[in-house]
């Protein structure tokens, strides 16, 4: 009964329920096609994608390590320079390298196609929004994509190298050698990069929650301490068990949380100004 009623309402609005399903199917097909095309391109560019991008943080000539060595020379603290990564990467399964080649190509394809995928999702959602909501959400694709790439870049250039350095130098006993499986290495790198990219979406989440009235700037300020604890716990979950990595991922998230408070405050000012203008118009 509820489904029939929904179909009747959709047909009255000019688009049937089946038309919505057909539109969703095409949006999904275009999104999946973009991911597959870029994944195939990444698979074919094995020497660059895998040899330079994926395995980059495992080599001492990685750009982050070079920057740290330059910084150590500048400030005179040699401990900052990472000139050795005492571990080797191995493949202990017959299909290990091929499987990881496929997996890493898909992850790279998804990251590269993310703006197009989100644009397709937004194209499906936006017709159901009111004009006021569309205007408020203008530029959503750009800002979501920007924050996604900023988070992925932070995870790849900052979080991953320092985490790999910590894990490769951690030893219970000098007789135990660090020989990591390729599956473990790529899984850790992927988790750090994608987790950072997702957590950097915090201002967007706060924006839409504030726009719908579910949260306010006062509420966010009141629960700031609780949010700090939650952020630290999440940082501990997605990072290796070292304090430096946890602080590194927690700091930008805390900054983004404060940015979310300012976003909510700005929306409240606009809402109050619009309400005051409507009251004046009604009075006239």
Image (cartoon, rainbow, N blue to C red):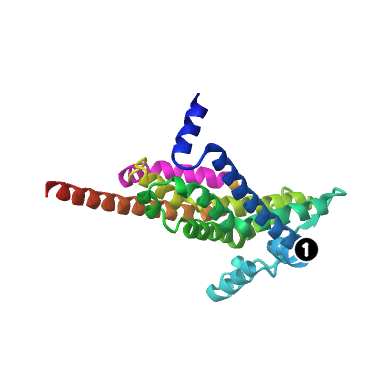
Asked if residue 279 lies left or right of residue 32, the reply is left
Seen in the picture, residue 198 relative to 153 is either above or below; the reply is above
Q: Main secondary structure of the magenta part?
A: helix
Question: Farthest residue in the right direction?
Answer: 94
Quadrant hosting residue 226: top left
**The residue stretch that appears in magenta:** 217-237
* Residue 29 seen from this side: yes
* Residue 179 seen from this side: no
Question: Farthest residue in the top direction?
Answer: 1
Magenta-drawn stretch contains 234:
yes
Residue at the image point whose x is 52% and y is 39% from the top: 16
Residue at the image point whose x is 72% and y is 64% from the top: 49
Question: Farthest residue in the bottom direction?
Answer: 74
Q: Residues within 10 Å of mark 1 (few under 14, many from 20)?
A: few
Tell me where residue 253 appears, x and y as whole percent: 47, 52
Tell me where residue 231 appears, x and y as whole percent: 48, 46
Asked if residue 172 lies left or right of residue 207, the reply is right
Of residues 97 and 16, the one drawn nearer to the viewer in this rendering: 16
Tell me where residue 94 appears, x and y as whole percent: 88, 49
Of residues 25 and 264, the one drawn nearer to the viewer in this rendering: 25
Of residues 30 and 81, the one drawn nearer to the viewer in this rendering: 30
Magenta-drawn stretch contains 242:
no
Q: Secondary structure at mark 1?
A: helix
Of residues 153 and 212, the one drawn nearer to the viewer in this rendering: 212
Q: Count every numbered label the image shows and give the total.
A: 1
Asked if residue 51 lies left or right of residue 73, the reply is right
Quadrant hosting residue 45: bottom right
For disc 1, the marked residue is 44
Residue at the image point whose x is 60% and y is 52% from the top: 194
Quadrant hosting residue 65: bottom right
Seen in the picture, residue 204 relative to 19 is either above or below; the reply is below
């Amino acid at each position: 009964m509820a489904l029939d009623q929904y179909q009747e309402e959709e047909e009255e609005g000019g688009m049937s329920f089946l038309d919505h399903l057909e539109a969703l199917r095409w949006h999904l097909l275009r999104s999946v096609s973009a991911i597959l095309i870029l994944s195939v391109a990444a698979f074919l560019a094995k020497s660059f994608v895998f040899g330079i991008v994926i395995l980059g943080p495992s080599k001492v000539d990685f750009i982050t390590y070079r920057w740290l060595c330059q910084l150590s020379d500048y400030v005179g603290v040699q401990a900052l320079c990472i000139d050795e990564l005492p571990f080797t990467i191995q493949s202990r399964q017959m299909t290990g390298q091929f499987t990881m080649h496929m997996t890493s190509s898909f992850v790279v394809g998804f990251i590269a196609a993310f703006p197009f995928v989100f644009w397709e999702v937004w194209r499906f959602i936006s017709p159901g929004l009111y004009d006021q909501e569309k205007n408020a959400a203008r530029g959503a694709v750009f800002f979501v994509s920007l924050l996604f790439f900023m988070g992925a870049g932070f995870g790849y250039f900052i979080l991953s190298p320092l985490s790999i350095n910590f894990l490769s130098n951690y030893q219970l006993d000098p007789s135990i050698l660090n020989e990591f499986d390729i599956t473990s290495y790529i899984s850790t790198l992927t988790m750090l990069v994608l987790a950072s990219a997702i957590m950097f979406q915090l201002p967007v989440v706060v924006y839409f929650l504030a726009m719908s009235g579910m949260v306010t700037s006062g509420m966010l300020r009141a629960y700031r301490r609780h949010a700090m604890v939650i952020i630290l716990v999440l940082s501990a979950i997605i990072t290796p068990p070292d304090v430096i990595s946890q602080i590194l991922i927690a700091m930008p998230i805390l900054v983004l949380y404060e940015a979310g408070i300012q976003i909510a405050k700005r929306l409240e000012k606009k809402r109050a100004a619009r309400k005051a203008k409507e009251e004046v118009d009604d009075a006239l």
